[in-house]
Image (cartoon, rainbow, N blue to C red):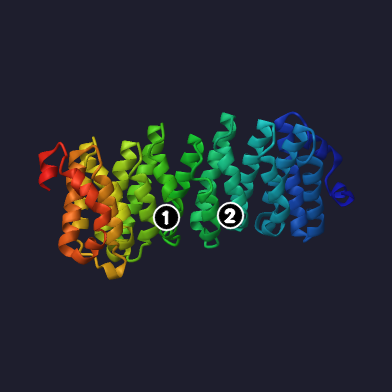
């Protein structure tokens, strides 16, 4: 600290903690000039001492004005360092990040402003702190103070710009961070997350599609949000990914099929429609990869054939016909027993159209895989007998 006091006049330090913003700002300009001169002289030990002073005596002070002064001072020091700032970032950034959770909203606001000015100077060197910054921005996007929210929004835009032009960004480290936040219900956080997914997906060198199974369920969850804007953003992101899937030579259909099957049974109409639209494309594109999931898919498609929403009924029928047209081989993961079990269960559906399609499936399997079906006869015989007394003539005929 003695080192720092020998280069930063006491009057400057006093003004840096003043309650008036103008005085703090002028003191910060003085700090910038001092640090700039020290950098020219190569006196990095003294620069370290100045940063330590700003951190320990100001940003970690119990006085709010000291904390505000420390933040503007750290940003000013970074501007003074210009191209040499990178080597001091490990000292500069953590106290600023720490201030994002300050109980005083003005301190949080100045922390956003300080980090914005630091990021503008160091650009890509900033990426090493990306995960902590993302975490902080995620919380600030839902801050109780509107000014803090809008300052965080500006910082977020700058960080997005830096990430999209950086070749040091590590998507593998980022995905777990995204995944654990995808089921947050706060509307501001949801918008923040969809915004990041969309931006990262637009960067040619970042393969977001490869990680889609990690956050697909979260996007589907947002389709039933009470805010129209969030539903629209999630739908737009999903449409973009579906388009990419159609154009991609290798896709992990299996993991995503499990998610889609869950979502196709959603009580929300829009979610159901989107899920079965995806399933429809998957059945066309996924081929053999989807064979182990046929029974699960059929389990959600048969009830959708009787959905109250016509669009859903139309897509469900289309998928049902596509599945029926695929001649599965029991020796290659095509599970006759599982499909029969689904058909049997759907025979007790309250909807006639679903019961009829379930019988069509039993009939189709009997024609194609008679030997296998007969081994399950005990399981399905009682249900078939019951169907003979069904109130619907067509079901009885089937």
Distance, label 2 to label 1, CA atoms, is 28 Å
- Count the marks: 2
In this rendering, position of residue 121 left or right of residue 9? left
In this rendering, position of residue 221 left or right of residue 353? right
Tell me the tag on residue 266.
none
Instruction: Give whichever of 92, 131 is nearer the camera.
Output: 131
In the figure, residue 309 lies in which quadrant?
top left
**Residue 272 spot, x, y in % from top left:** 31, 42
Tags 2 and 1 in contact by the CB under 8 Å rule? Answer: no
Residue ranking furthest to the bottom: 331
**Residue 47 spot, x, y in % from top left:** 78, 54
Secondary structure type for disc 1: helix
**Residue highlighted by disc 1:** 212
User: Which label's residue is closer to the chain start, 2 or 1?
Assistant: 2
**Residue 56 spot, x, y in % from top left:** 80, 45
Please determine whether, in this image, residue 328 is positioned above or below residue 389.
below
In the figure, residue 339 lies in which quadrant?
bottom left
Q: Mark 2 or mark 1, which is nearer to you?
A: 1
Q: Residue at x 65, y 43 (%)?
A: 114
Q: Residues within 10 Å of mark 2 (few under 14, many from 20)?
A: some
Q: Residue at x 20, y 44 (%)?
A: 386
Tell me the tag on residue 123.
2
Instruction: Give whichever of 51, 93 is nearer the camera.
Output: 93
Secondary structure type for disc 2: helix
Q: Is residue 125 visible?
A: yes
In this rendering, position of residue 288 left or right of residue 90? left
Instruction: Give whichever of 230, 80 is nearer the camera.
Output: 230
**Residue 175 spot, x, y in % from top left:** 51, 55
Instruction: Give whichever of 36, 288 is nearer the camera.
Output: 288
Q: Is residue 248 visible?
A: no
């Amino acid at each position: 600290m003695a080192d720092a006091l020998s280069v930063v006049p006491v009057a400057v330090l006093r003004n840096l903690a003043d309650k008036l913003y103008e005085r703090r700002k002028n003191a910060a300009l003085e700090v910038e000039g001092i640090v700039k001169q020290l950098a020219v002289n190569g006196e990095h030990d003294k620069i370290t001492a100045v940063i330590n002073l700003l951190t320990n005596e100001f940003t970690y002070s119990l006085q709010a004005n000291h904390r505000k002064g420390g933040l503007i001072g750290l940003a000013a020091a970074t501007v003074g360092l210009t191209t040499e700032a990178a080597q001091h970032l490990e000292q500069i950034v953590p106290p600023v990040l720490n201030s994002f959770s300050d109980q005083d909203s003005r301190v949080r606001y100045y922390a956003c402003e300080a980090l914005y000015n630091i990021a503008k100077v160091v650009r890509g060197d900033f990426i090493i702190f990306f995960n902590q910054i993302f975490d902080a921005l995620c919380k600030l996007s839902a801050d109780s103070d509107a000014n803090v929210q809008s300052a965080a929004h500006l910082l977020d835009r700058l960080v997005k710009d830096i990430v999209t032009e950086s070749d040091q960004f590590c998507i593998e480290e980022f995905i777990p961070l995204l995944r654990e936040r995808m089921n947050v219900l706060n509307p501001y956080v949801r918008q923040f997350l969809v915004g990041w997914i969309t931006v990262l997906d637009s960067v040619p060198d970042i393969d977001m599609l490869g990680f889609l199974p990690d956050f697909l369920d979260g996007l589907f969850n947002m389709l039933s949000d009470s805010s129209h804007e969030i539903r629209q953003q999630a739908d737009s992101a999903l449409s973009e990914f579906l388009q990419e899937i159609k154009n991609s030579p290798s896709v992990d259909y299996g993991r995503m099929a499990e998610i889609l099957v869950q979502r196709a049974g959603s009580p929300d109409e829009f979610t159901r429609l989107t899920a079965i639209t995806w399933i429809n494309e998957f059945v066309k594109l996924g081929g053999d990869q989807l064979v182990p999931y046929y029974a699960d898919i059929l389990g959600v498609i048969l009830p959708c054939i009787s959905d109250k929403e016509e669009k859903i009924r139309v897509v469900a029928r289309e998928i049902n016909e596509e599945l029926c047209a695929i001649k599965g081989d029991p020796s290659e993961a095509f599970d006759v027993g599982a499909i029969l079990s689904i058909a049997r269960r759907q025979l007790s559906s309250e909807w006639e159209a679903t019961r009829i399609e379930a019988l069509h499936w039993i009939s189709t399997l009997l024609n194609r895989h008679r030997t296998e079906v007969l081994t399950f006869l005990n399981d399905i015989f009682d249900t078939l007998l019951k169907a003979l007394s069904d109130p619907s003539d067509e079901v009885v005929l089937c």
